[in-house]
Amino acid sequence: MRLSAAAIACLLVISCSDDEMQDVPHFRPMQESILFADGTSARTPPQGTLARGQLDTDVALHYGREPTS
């Protein structure tokens, strides 16, 4: 049991020491990109995507109960 725990700990330490994990490419909105055919990093959101922080005003739809007031 102790040997397997030590082996797992060693594997975790070794796997996290890779420098490439820190060098992940990030894109700013509307930045040029050669990765996509249209040349932009912005992607069209899928149909039905909700905006972050969208207000859920329909209580019956979102919570499954009738409003009390």
Image: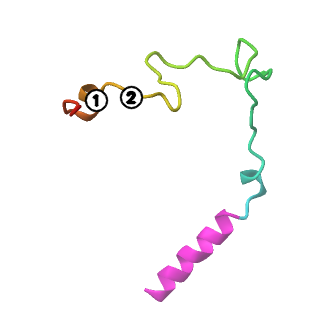
Q: Position of residue 57 (x, y in %)?
A: 36, 26
Residue at 55% across, 78% down: 7
Residue at 74% across, 18% down: 40
Residue at 70% across, 19% down: 36
Q: Crowding near pointer 1: few (<14 within 10 Å), some, many (20+)?
A: few
Q: Residue furthest front?
A: 69
Q: Position of residue 22 (x, y in %)?
A: 75, 52
The one nearer the camera, 7 or 31, is: 31
User: Which secondary structure lies at badge 1?
Assistant: helix
- Name the quadrant containing residue 16: bottom right
Q: Is residue 27 magenta?
A: no
Q: Say if mark 1 contacts mark 2, CB within 8 Å.
A: yes
Q: Is residue 4 magenta?
A: yes
Range shown magenta: 1-16
The numbered dot on residue 56 is 2
Which residue type does callout 2 highlight? Asp
Mark 1 highlights which residue? 59
**Quarter of the rendering occupied by the N terminus:** bottom left
